[in-house]
Image (cartoon, grey):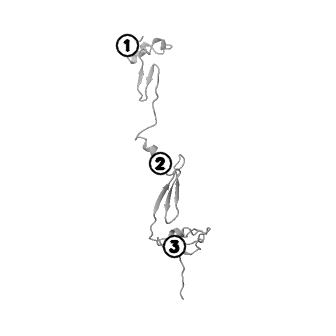
Amino acid sequence: MSIQVQVRRGTNAQRQTMDGGVGNPAKPLAGELIYTTDQKLLYVGDGTTTGGNLVGGGSGTTNLSTTANATSLTVNSDTGNDASIPAATASAWGAMTDEDKTKLDGIAASANNYSHPNHTGDVTSTGDGATVIANNAVTTAKINNNAVTSAKLATTLDFGSIV
């Protein structure tokens, strides 16, 4: 007595339409075999999965490609399900967007975000941190309550006479 086994055949693109939707073939029944003629892979149905599940041990090749947009990166598979990776945020890991990469490339190695402020008046400074006291800026009238005296100045620095 011989047993005949019937196998659905078609391209992988046709297999991926086996979802029972309008105009599409029905999902493979539990145990039903599907053979892709373009990839030479064997799938088995479980009654619920569109196109069935790949039978292990195949020697087929999976071709992967990517599609990116402003919010995610999609890894496309020609033999299975695609995977979408969202863009990274401050609170979640993800793919780096082209905007993030451009910003990162604009930062020099060992850089920091500190900018020395500029000051004006009798004591001035510039963004590079250089500080200059204007000529005749320190006078006796500007010294309050004898907080700074010529004796105190003489013990640390020799400014000569203070006018």
Residue farthest bottom in this picture: 1
Residue at 48%, 46% in the rendered image:
99
Q: Residue 89 location, x and y as percent?
A: 53, 47
Name the kind of residue labelled 1 in the image. Gly
Quadrant including the C terminus: top left
Whole-number angstrom distance, CA of label 3 to CA of label 2? 39 Å
Depicted 132 relative to depicted 111: above or below: above
Please tell me which of labels 1 and 3 falls first in the chain.
3
Q: Disc 1 marks which residue? A: 160
Q: Nearer the viewer, mark 1 or mark 2?
A: 2
Mark 2 or mark 3, which is nearer the start of the sequence?
3
76 vs 24, left or right, is: left
- The residue where tag 2 is placed is 98
With respect to residue 114, does 93 lie above or below? Answer: below
Tell me how far mark 1 sits from mark 3, CA to CA.
99 Å
Q: Where residue 6 sits in the image (x, y, percent)? A: 54, 79
3D distance between C-alphas at marks 1 and 2: 61 Å
Q: Nearer the viewer, mark 1 or mark 3?
A: 3
Instruction: From this view, report whether residue 45 is shown above or below residue 163.
Output: below
Q: Position of residue 96 (x, y in %)?
A: 48, 49
The amino acid type found where label 3 is placed reads Gly
Q: Residue at x 48, y 57 (%)?
A: 66
The answer to whether the residues at label 1 and label 3 have Cβ atoms under 8 Å apart is no
Q: Look at the numbered disc 3 and give the secondary structure of its residue.
A: strand
Q: Secondary structure at mark 2?
A: helix
Q: Identify the disc placed on residue 10.
A: 3
User: Which residue occupies the extreme front position in the image?
Assistant: 23
Q: Earlier in the sequence, mark 1 or mark 2?
A: 2
Identified by mark 2, the residue type is: Asp
